[in-house]
Image: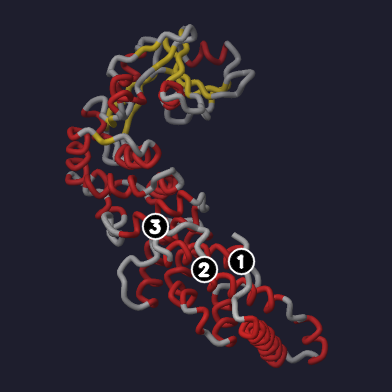
Amino acid sequence: MKIYTVGGAVRDALLGLAVKDRDYVVVGTTPEAMVALGYTPVGKDFPVFLHPQTHEEYALARTERKTAPGYKGFVFHAAGDVTLEQDLARRDLTINAIARADDGTLVDPYDGRGDLARKLFRHVSDAFAEDPVRILRVARFAARFSDFSVAPATNLLMQRMVASGEVDALVPERVWQELARGLMEQQPSRMVQVLRDCGALSCLLPEVDGDGPVLALLDHAAQQGLPLPVRVAVLLHDPVGGEAAARTQLVDAIAARLKMPGECRDLAVMVARDGSTVVQALALSADAIVGLIERSDGLRKPQRFGDMLIAVRCIAQGGATSSQPFPQAALLIAALQAARGVPAGVIAAGLGARPQAIAQAVRCARIDAVASLMNRISRVGAAPQQNN
């Protein structure tokens, strides 16, 4: 029995990057022998075991055979006679098909080290075409390793996969998982560009312009270290142009199609619906500002309201530095604080059991509080300072 470190851990170590997760492949043994050594089986589709002390995952060397469309249409064979080279042959890219033995010896049958030096994403074999998730993985890797390029032959193979309908077999959850990971990389525009170049973008996100200003905004959001919901909102802020209602409806449909988490869907919808209102905030009445706060549920979720302002600032400034003033956000944050400072409980106690009257009185008090704030700002001649 021999154990090798494989995949991303070897790749990242060769690139001089921090290694976060380690994958191990075990050659020359059986599931029964692994259990006898104290490993705990956890794999459903193929034998994977947890180490008895470290609890890291160890997978038996395996081969795979395509039996149906999509990324789940495989039959796996794991046995003691499967070689390390056979296991590496089923991997996606040459840079991920390098193994390291316990003594540090590298096994690199597909010249992954050469492709690391060339900064090239190249598929190991035509078996790449059997798994459409690999298109998403290449795009995600491009966002992470932004100075790498896709080998022309690999891009051509991905184009053929799109044309054959393999991408259509992807389930929304897996698409979202890979897109979300790519959006959180250092240059997410590269993911969009790779998907566009092979034709997959028109299948997965046809509403997004893969070669427009939104890509620069997306990278600007990444440079600021903004969270995933904000990056999603920036990506989807204007998928078709036109009226806010049409944008909002389309963003909601995209979120439903990809089965996005609620926090990503909600913020993207808010930005599509009210982004232009935020930009016009300095010209709004107190009533309109309170309406914006209410639509955005800012009274209950002030952090999300703040995230909306961050996303809109990123979009409105067109990729300018985050230190550039954005007085609209400062005003709206101060207005939210003023509205939240209204003693709703005291007002309710004074009106008794009249819900409609209470709601109206509380809203009027919030409008008065925001109007008072705006009057103070007008007298001073500047919006309050926003903490970045």
**What type is the residue that disc 1 sits on?**
Gln
Q: CA distance from mark 2 to mark 1?
A: 8 Å
Residue 96 percent across, percent down from the top left: 36, 25
As measured in the structure, the alpha-carbon distance from the residue carrying label 3 to the one carrying label 1 is: 21 Å
At which x and y percent is residue 67? 27, 33
At 41% across and 58% down in the image, what residue appears? 319
Residue 386 is labelled as 1
- Dot 3 falls on a residue whose secondary structure is helix
- Label 3 or label 1, whichever comes before in sequence order: 3
Locate residue 9, reporting x and y percent.
46, 24
Q: 322 or 9, which lies in front?
A: 322
| Residue 82: image tag | none
Q: Give the amino acid at mark 2.
A: Phe
Q: Is residue 388 above or below residue 34?
A: below
Q: Earlier in the sequence, mark 3 or mark 2?
A: 3
Is residue 258 placed above or below 76 in the rendered structure? Answer: below
Q: Pointers 2 and 1 in contact (CB under 8 A)? A: yes
Judge left or right: residue 133 versus residue 357.
Answer: left
The residue tagged 3 is: 217
Judging by the rendered image, the residue that carries numbered circle 2 is 326
Protein image colouring: secondary structure
